[in-house]
Amino acid sequence: MKTIGLLGGMSWESTATYYQTINRTVSEKLGGLHSAKLLLYSVDFAEVEELQHADRWAEAGSLLGDAAVTLQEAGADFIVLCTNTMHRVAADIENRAQAPLLHIADPTAEAIRRRGLSTVGLLGTAFTMEQEFYRGRLERRFGLEVQVPKASSRQLVHDVIYSELCRGIISESSRQAFRRVVDELAAKGAEAIILGCTEIGLLLRPGDVSVPLFDTADLHARAAASFALDGAAGA
């Protein structure tokens, strides 16, 4: 079994989900008392959030790259960055650490393609929804058509993520607001929705909406467990 290097804390609310899902997946696959071999480097998210909103991505990349090197030197065989938004600096991490990075978009896109879907809506932070680094990977590598909400809905989703979900606040009013955003995307032709922030799965469940949801935190964690066991990223 490979040793997983979790680069988390962005936020710790969803990093806890990664730890649980990875260990449960390993237990399901191996049985008995088996659990995952993993290391966790949890950053102070306040520092990262400040760099995000100040558009200081190079500094953020350096910070996370150094953390990845620490995980590698401690024995991690590969790196799992437990956040969608900070894959904005995935190349910086890969350039700093020799251990491979299991990109969060890849198992998500593979799961969508296995379902025979091609047009998806994307929810996440404004950075993830609006910048090219995430949508572009889904479009170029996997041929997906990616739709995002209108500007006012993007702002709503972004604000709920930072002011509520990253603080562990789960609000029924926000759940209803997210349902309306999903309905908006479905009306535009989205066949499914990518929960492109690792906290959104804490708020929105499959039974809440009429289209399939692809929870990136769950898919990424399961792919990490599979890769640790057999070298294949498929969940």
Image (cartoon, helix red, strand yellow):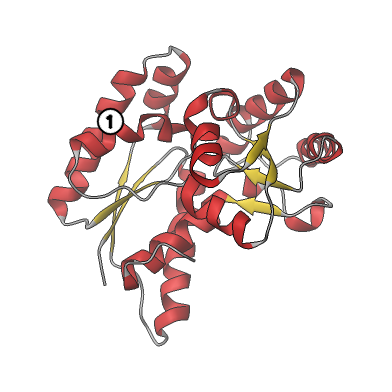
Residue 19 at x, y percent in the picture:
43, 59
Q: In the rendered image of this protein, does residue 223 appear above or below residue 79? A: below
Q: In the rendered image of this protein, does residue 213 appear above or below residue 63? A: below
Q: In the rendered image of this protein, does residue 194 appear above or below residue 205? A: above
- Identify residue for label 1: 92
Q: Nearer the viewer, residue 156 or 224?
A: 224
Q: Nearer the viewer, residue 136 or 17?
A: 136
Residue under the image location 49 percent in, 55 percent down: 107
Residue under the image location 25 percent in, 26 percent down: 62
Q: Is residue 31 left or right of residue 36?
A: right
Residue under the image location 33 percent in, 72 percent down: 229
Residue 93 at x, y percent in the picture:
27, 36
Q: Nearer the viewer, residue 125 or 140?
A: 140
Residue under the image location 86 percent in, 37 percent down: 187
Residue 29 visible? The answer is: yes
Residue 164 at x, y percent in the picture:
63, 33
Q: In the rendered image of this protein, does residue 234 appear above or below residue 65? A: below
Name the amino acid, label 1: Asp
**Image quarter hosting the N terminus:** bottom left
Q: Is residue 7 left or right of residue 137?
A: left
Q: Residue furthest left?
A: 73
Residue 20 visible? The answer is: no
Badge 1 density bin: few <14, some 14–19, many ≥20, Cα 10 Å: many
Residue 217 at x, y percent in the picture:
52, 51
Q: Is residue 213 left or right of residue 100?
A: right
Q: How many marks?
A: 1
Q: Nearer the viewer, residue 28 or 233?
A: 233
Q: Residue furthest top?
A: 54
Q: On the image, which quarter does residue 50 sit in?
A: top left
Give SS at disc 1.
helix
